[in-house]
Amino acid sequence: MRQRVRVLVAVGVLTLGAGGAGTARAAVAAPPCPATELFATNNTAIITEPTDPRLNDRLQRFDHEVRGIIHANGARPGASTLLNGVFWSGELKRTTYERSRVFDVSHVNRDGLHHIASIVAKQYHQESVLTFRCLPRASHEADAVEIRASGVSATKLQGALAADPEAREELGGGSVTLDGRLILVAPLADLPLARKFTQSLGVDWNRAEVRYGDEEFVS
C-alpha cells in the first residue's frame, strides 16, 4: 500500500472513490453518483502548515481551465467541488495539506477519461491524476471504496492521522469539503481499516455512505 500512498500524496487528494449504490446500512440509500469523476490540483508545492495562505485558493481559474479541457476532448463537465486534503508524508514524517477539486464528467468512456486525465496531469505538472468510474458493488472491476460522512473537519482529520500509525501508512490521508464532509477512498481490501479509522473520527458508521468503483492513477 505504500506505493499507493506515495501516489495519493502526489495527486494531492485522497478522493472520491465512486461506487455503484452501496451504503454502510442497507436501509439508507446512497444518492446516485456520476458515471465518472476526476480529481486534480494545480499545486506542485509541499505545504506543511494548515495556516498557509495557499490553502485559501478556491482554484476558480483551475476549475475553468479543466472544464475547458474536458469539453475540448469530447466530454461534458458537470459539478466541481473544492476539497481540503490532509495527508501523511512518510518521507517528511509529518502532515501535508492540499487544495484540490473533483470534477464530474459525463459523455465519456474509460479510454476518453484516461486521455483527459493524462492531459491535466501533464499541463499542471502532476505526477498523477486520479479518476473513478461508478460501478455496481458486485462488479469484478470494483477495486476501491469511497466513504463519505458529515461532521469532520480538516483539524479532526489531521489529529486522527497523527494518532493512528496504521491508518496514515496504509490509507495515507483523506479530504473534507468546505462544509465538513469527509471523503475517504481506500482499496477494497482495506475497507475494515477504513471503517475503523472513520469511526475514530466520531462518525456513526451506520450513517456513512459507502460507494464502490474502479480507480486509476493517470500520469
Image: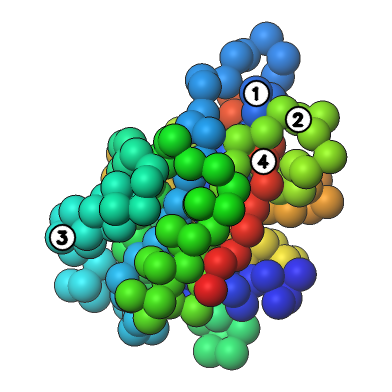
> Amino acid type of disc 3?
Arg
Q: Residues within 10 Å of mark 3 (few under 14, many from 20)?
A: few
Mark 2 → mark 4, Cα distance in angstroms: 8 Å
Image height check: is 216 above or below 143? below
Q: Quadrant of the N terminus?
A: bottom right
- Determine contact: label 2, label 4, CB under 8 Å: no
The residue singled out by tag 4 in the image is 213
In the shown orientation, is residue 91 left or right of residue 55? right
Mark 1 → mark 2, Cα distance in angstroms: 7 Å
- Mark sitting on residue 137: 2
- Determine contact: label 1, label 2, CB under 8 Å: yes
- Determine contact: label 1, label 4, CB under 8 Å: no
Earlier in the chain: of badge 1 and badge 4, it is 1
Indicate the position of residue 38 as horizontal and vertical percent values: 45, 52
In the shown orientation, is residue 214 left or right of residue 127? right
Mark 2 → mark 3, Cα distance in angstroms: 36 Å
Indicate the position of residue 85 as horizontal and vertical percent values: 42, 61
Q: Secondary structure at mark 1?
A: loop
The residue singled out by tag 1 in the image is 21
User: Residue 24 lies in what quarter of the image?
Assistant: top right
- Determine contact: label 1, label 3, CB under 8 Å: no
User: Residue 58 lies in what quarter of the image?
Assistant: bottom left
The residue singled out by tag 3 in the image is 61
Earlier in the chain: of badge 1 and badge 2, it is 1
Indicate the position of residue 25 as horizontal and vertical percent values: 70, 19
